[in-house]
């Protein structure tokens, strides 16, 4: 008699898919940095972002996330939590089938609504609430004790802007021409 061992695949729900800055869950936009919370995926120790030929790798810690079969650029993977960038290829769709793959085992697809933008600003404490992770023009942390002077430039960290101009390319870091959401 042959014994068959069933391998549980990675699993997550729509409520476990959220904006990496403010954790607004249940929808994604092209180019958005997201987190996925679930089970049966990710290594015991944090596996971080890797660059391959100048592009963000689509696998880290033996973990991948697929959007309608398109592998997402991976930011990190750890037991029960993933961060990746939603591929720009979801642009124009109303939903995308998201699959988490760990050690070559794919979990069940979860249908996730696609919207034009899911804006979120990162916070200092990484909780999605409280003071923003904002810098003053001199790169000092903006706070009530260290406010920005009128007329100076503030640096805000955010995600979820949707497709940009020039058009975003999945996995390509912005290093020289920073895209905007402005139509020209």
Image (cartoon, rainbow, N blue to C red):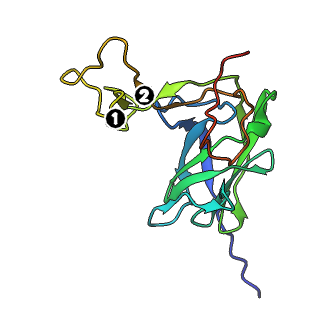
Q: Which residue is mark 1?
A: 139
Residue 65, position as x, y percentages in the image? 67, 52
Q: Regarding mark 1 in the picture, which secondary structure is present there?
A: loop
Residue 155, position as x, y percentages in the image? 42, 28
Residue occupying image coordinates x 81% and y 29%: 93
Q: Is residue 182 above or below residue 83?
A: above
- In which quadrant is the N terminus drawn? bottom right
Mark 1 → mark 2, Cα distance in angstroms = 8 Å
Quick one: label 2, few (<14), some, or many (20+) residues within 10 Å? some
Q: Is residue 126 left or right of residue 31?
A: left
- Can residue 26 be seen in the rendering of this structure? yes
Residue occupying the far top of the picture: 150
Residue occupying image coordinates x 61% and y 41%: 174
Residue occupying image coordinates x 61% and y 40%: 176
Which of these two is toward me, 44 or 33? 33
Q: Which residue is mark 2?
A: 155
Image mark count = 2
Q: Is residue 40 left or right of residue 109?
A: left
Residue 149, position as x, y percentages in the image? 29, 16
Which of these two is toward me, 183 or 113? 183
Q: Are marks 1 and 2 in contact (CB under 8 Å)?
A: yes
């Amino acid at each position: 008699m042959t014994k068959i061992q069933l391998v549980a695949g990675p699993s997550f729900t729509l409520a476990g898919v959220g904006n990496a800055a403010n954790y607004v869950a249940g929808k994604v936009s092209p180019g958005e940095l997201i987190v996925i919370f679930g089970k049966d995926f990710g290594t015991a120790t944090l596996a971080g972002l890797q660059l391959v030929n100048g592009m963000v790798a689509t696998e880290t810690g033996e973990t991948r996330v697929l959007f309608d079969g398109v592998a997402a650029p991976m930011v990190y993977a750890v037991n029960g939590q993933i961060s990746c960038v939603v591929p720009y290829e979801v642009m124009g769709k109303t939903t995308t089938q998201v699959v988490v793959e760990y050690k070559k085992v794919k979990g069940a697809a979860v249908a996730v609504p696609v919207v034009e933008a899911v804006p979120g600003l990162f916070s200092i404490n990484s909780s999605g609430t409280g003071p923003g992770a904002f810098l003053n023009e001199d790169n000092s942390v903006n706070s009530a004790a260290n406010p920005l002077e009128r007329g100076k430039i503030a640096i805000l960290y955010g995600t979820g802007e949707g497709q940009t101009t020039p058009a975003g390319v999945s996995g390509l870091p912005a290093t020289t021409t920073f895209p905007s959401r402005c139509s020209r």
